[in-house]
Amino acid sequence: MEQNLSSSRTDRKLMEKNRRNQMKALYSQLNSLVPRESSREPALSVPDQLEEAASYIKRLQASLEKMKEKRDRLMGMERANYISKNSSRGTITGSRSPRIEVREMGSTLEVVLMNGSDNLFMFNEIIRALHEEGAEIINASLSAVEDTVFHTVHSKVRDSAHSMNTAARISQRLKMFVEDDREF
């Protein structure tokens, strides 16, 4: 009976020691993710580390919200400018209908959007669609010739095993987006 009690205590002590070691490793990992102003700062206690991490996360959330608001505000302004310019001309489709070309080269996609200078919001939508589909943007450029704007985006599909299916899906989604916008 006494041996079982001793064995049980040893097991509990070992479990508690493992739990503490795991928590220590997790605290250390969390602490390594929080940027420091100076590497010469003294080591913080665990409660201070947690407080600093929570504060950092709150700052990131506030920054993210500000960026989302700014993006929405800018997207709304671009859309409003687009509509007001076109409605003053008595047309809704813009001076140049958008066209898109998508070239698949293995796991790489080249997207070329050609549209009028009054239809710049489409570039943002293409970048968003590529990002949502998991494509990594490698390069993006813009050039203008007279009243036509050429947006070129090079991206890489991350999942190489299914890159052909993903590339085809992205290509179809972008073409549908442009077709839907022409009707706008």
Image (cartoon, helix red, strand yellow):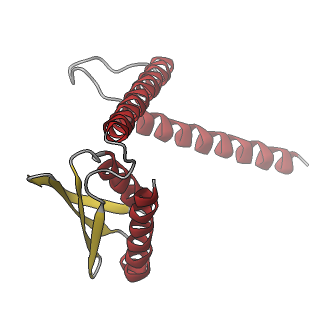
Residue 100 is situated, as x and y percent measured from the top left of the image, at 29, 67
* Position of 157 relative to 22 (above/below): below
* Horizontal side of residue 14 vs 143, given as left or right: right
Tell me if I can see residue 140 in this picture.
Answer: no
| Residue at screen point 33% across, 36% down | 88
Nearest the viewer among 58 and 140 is 140
Residue 19 is situated, as x and y percent measured from the top left of the image, at 61, 41
| Residue at screen point 48% across, 34% down | 27
| Residue at screen point 21% across, 21% down | 38
* Position of 23 relative to 45 (above/below): below
Give residue 140's quadrant in the image.
Answer: bottom left
Extreme residue in the right direction: 1
Question: How many numbered marks appear?
Answer: 0
Residue 65 is situated, as x and y percent measured from the top left of the image, at 45, 27
* Horizontal side of residue 94 vs 51, given as left or right: left
Residue 20 is situated, as x and y percent measured from the top left of the image, at 58, 37
Nearest the viewer among 153 and 52 is 153
Nearest the viewer among 10 and 175 is 175
Tell me if I can see residue 122 in this picture.
Answer: yes
| Residue at screen point 39% across, 52% down | 128
* Position of 63 relative to 97 (above/below): above
Extreme residue in the front direction: 90
* Position of 150 relative to 71 (above/below): below
